Image (cartoon, coloured by chain):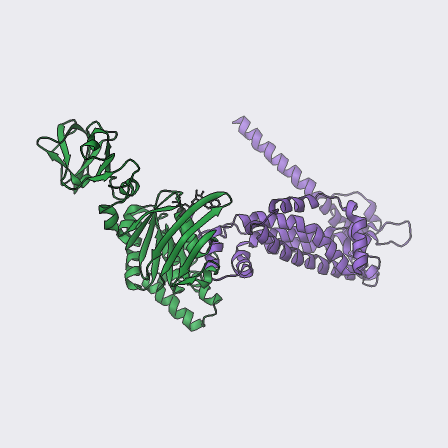
Chain colours: A purple, B green
């Protein structure tokens, strides 16, 4: 009995620990973002000030640069997700359903690509982007992010598609469906959970990415939000505008939270139930 | 409406030969059943006809036209799968309409056809439901309905009943038999390893073993005149009694086979033995008699048996009911 009590206590202690260590930084960012003036440098764990000054500064001080960056981030992350999912869905159909020579080698290569550290491919990718003439445009980042999210999305969707019953596809073939119709009208509706999950992760990856964004853009109005935040400047050269940085971080996190809340309802398992026996 | 001809059809997966040269004609409007033990290539042969697998060599023709390279949807076939294979995210109506939508049928046309098929199979009340809201038997009826809507020239079934429980299997079997009668111009090819299904549904049965056709004929032909031991043993339940050695010698054969209903208890002569077990089914009794052969002989009597377990009895085959086989298994 005592043992059982101890175990469940230990379990909840662990849960609390994990929750705190995951949420505390964000909580601290939120309360700091509402502090103004010298309050910022007081260490407090409870809100002791409520001022929207930081938010006003971030949004309006730099002639709308932040809003511009924010918009860039949305466009780039969304395009990355759409492009990456489109390529991944078609690729995973081939990789999971079409028998061809070198299929597993190809799958392994795709996985291997995702192991390269970003910094290792930075120079090569830079040349490529210069060569394509898309340096300092949103296309540069969409291009780079798509490449970097593809291994993951292809891998996950291939695994998922492989588990879809083959008979359903064959029934569609007999019904006269082309591969494209099979993907669009039969597989896609069954793949919602996987699409939502991979799409969200791809979005978050593109949204938070810093190194490529810093390297492949050079002007204020093509930058994305992570770089934009790092370049926020205070009143003097030596002042780090913590309040504004925190406010910007909170604003930047909101779309992610919104996305997760919207799509969590879509993540329903058991969509294939009833189609085939067993 | 289609006459199917298979000429020396072969199929191999890599280096494994699965179908080793099948010659077969399936007549227009015929109900042909493929039976055989598990792994003999029934499904593969059906899938070759459907076009879901490529034929390695040989030709397959529908009404004289070679269709080896024709896509499944162009062959005028419809297929019912063992696992139903319904589209899980579509309602019953959408499931049945999908094929026609793809081929560009008009909305009204589709509606009429789907409703007609649904009425035929008594699934009209479920048209708006998803497959997961149906029972196994209803799902299989939807799958059959989807096939009907395509208005095929050839119906292909791959063990459509094997996921259903016994009572439902009998009911759905009747459904399929009725379907065949009502669409008597449609050729049907049906795969099963249940020989009761084969016997009850088929116009003709094709017995397969190991990628080769053993015998093709009407159920009664196969039952009465099997051309070899394999077919003799495969068709009929309980299995035909086989006897070798001294039992067969007097018939000048390597092996003799006698069906259980062609054995009888005799007062004198015959083979002596003792009853080791009796299965009393009510309408029939199956007595297992050990006469010293490799396996006990099964004897069928109508009604209840007069012989108790352990009783000493004499049994003999009825005149003219003995099947004789040579050492290579061929009927003599
Ligand atoms: N795609 C494939 N690749 C390799 N071998 C295969 C493939 N499909 C089937 N086979 C082999 O072909 C043989 C025949 O398979 P098939 O499915 O036609 O058997 P079946 O007669 O339908 O058996 P069952 O009654 O168990 O369904 C089997 O030995 C199987 O292992
Ligand atoms: Mg099979």
Image coordinates for residue B113, horizontal then vertical, percent: 38, 68
* Residue B131 shows in the view: no
In the picture provided, is B170 more to the left or to the right than B44?
A: left
In the picture provided, is B97 more to the left or to the right than A21?
A: left
Q: Quick one: B77 or A71, which is closer to the camera?
A: B77
Q: Would you place residue B283 above or below residue B25 in this image?
A: above
How many numbered discs sit on the rendered protein?
A: 0
Image coordinates for residue B249, horizontal then vertical, percent: 20, 31
* Residue A133 shows in the view: yes
Image coordinates for residue B323, horizontal then vertical, percent: 21, 40
Q: Which residue is drawn at 62% across and 38% down?
A: A15
Residue extending furthest left? Answer: B267
Q: Quick one: A269 or A262, which is closer to the camera?
A: A269
In the picture provided, is B177 more to the left or to the right than B65?
A: left
Q: Which residue is drawn at 32% across and 52% down?
A: B33
Q: Quick one: A65 or B174, which is closer to the camera?
A: B174
Image coordinates for residue B203, horizontal then vertical, percent: 28, 55
């Amino acid at each position: 009995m005592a043992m059982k009590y101890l175990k469940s206590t230990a379990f909840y202690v662990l849960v609390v620990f994990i929750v705190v260590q995951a949420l505390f930084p964000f909580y601290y960012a939120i309360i700091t973002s509402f502090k103004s003036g010298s309050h910022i440098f007081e260490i407090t764990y409870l809100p002791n000030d409520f001022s929207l000054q930081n938010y006003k500064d971030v949004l309006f001080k730099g002639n709308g640069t932040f809003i511009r960056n924010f918009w860039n981030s949305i466009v780039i992350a969304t395009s990355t997700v759409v492009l990456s999912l489109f390529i991944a869905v078609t690729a995973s159909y081939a990789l999971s359903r079409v028998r061809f020579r070198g299929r597993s080698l190809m799958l392994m290569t795709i996985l291997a690509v995702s192991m390269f550290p970003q910094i290792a491919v930075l120079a090569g990718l830079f040349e490529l982007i210069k060569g394509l003439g898309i340096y300092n445009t949103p296309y540069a980042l969409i291009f780079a992010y798509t490449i970097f999210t593809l291994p993951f999305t292809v891998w996950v969707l291939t695994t998922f598609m492989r588990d879809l019953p083959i008979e359903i596809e064959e029934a569609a073939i007999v019904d006269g469906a082309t591969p494209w119709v099979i993907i669009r009208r039969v597989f896609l509706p069954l793949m919602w959970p996987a699409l939502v999950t991979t799409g969200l992760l791809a979005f978050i990856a593109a949204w938070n990415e810093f190194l490529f964004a810093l390297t492949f853009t050079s002007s204020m109005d093509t930058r994305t939000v992570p770089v934009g935040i790092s370049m926020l400047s205070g009143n003097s050269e030596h002042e780090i505008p913590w309040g504004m940085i925190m406010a910007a971080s909170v604003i930047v996190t909101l779309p992610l939270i919104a996305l997760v809340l919207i799509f969590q309802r879509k993540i329903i398992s058991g969509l294939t139930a009833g189609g085939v026996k067993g | 409406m289609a006459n199917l001809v298979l000429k020396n059809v072969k199929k191999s997966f890599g280096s494994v030969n699965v179908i080793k040269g099948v010659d077969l004609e399936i007549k227009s409007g015929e109900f042909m059943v493929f039976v055989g033990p598990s792994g003999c290539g029934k499904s593969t042969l059906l899938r070759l006809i459907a076009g879901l697998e490529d034929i390695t060599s040989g030709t397959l023709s529908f009404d004289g036209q070679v269709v080896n390279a024709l896509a499944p949807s162009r062959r005028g076939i419809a297929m019912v799968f063992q696992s139903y294979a319904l589209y899980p995210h579509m309602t019953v109506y959408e499931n049945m309409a999908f094929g026609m939508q793809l081929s560009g049928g008009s909305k009204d046309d589709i509606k009429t056809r789907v409703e007609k098929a649904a009425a035929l199979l008594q699934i009209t009340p479920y048209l708006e439901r998803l497959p997961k809201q149906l029972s196994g038997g209803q799902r299989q009826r939807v799958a059959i309905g989807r096939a009907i809507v395509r208005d095929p020239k050839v119906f292909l079934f791959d063990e459509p009943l094997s996921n259903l429980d016994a009572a439902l299997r009998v009911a759905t079997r009747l459904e399929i038999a009725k379907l065949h009668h009502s669409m008597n111009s449609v050729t049907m090819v049906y795969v099963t390893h249940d020989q009761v299904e084969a016997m009850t549904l088929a116009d003709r049965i094709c017995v397969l073993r190991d990628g080769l056709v053993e015998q093709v004929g009407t159920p009664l032909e196969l039952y009465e005149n099997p051309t070899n031991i394999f077919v003799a043993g495969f068709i009929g339940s309980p299995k035909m009694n086989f006897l070798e050695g001294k039992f067969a010698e007097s018939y000048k054969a390597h092996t003799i086979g006698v069906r259980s209903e062609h054995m009888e208890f005799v007062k004198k002569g015959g083979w002596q033995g003792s009853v080791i077990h009796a299965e009393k089914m009510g309408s029939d009794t199956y007595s297992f008699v050990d006469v010293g052969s490799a396996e006990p002989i099964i004897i069928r009597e109508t009604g209840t048996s007069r012989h108790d377990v352990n009783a000493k009895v004499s049994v003999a085959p009825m005149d003219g009911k003995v099947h004789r086989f040579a050492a290579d298994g061929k009927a003599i």
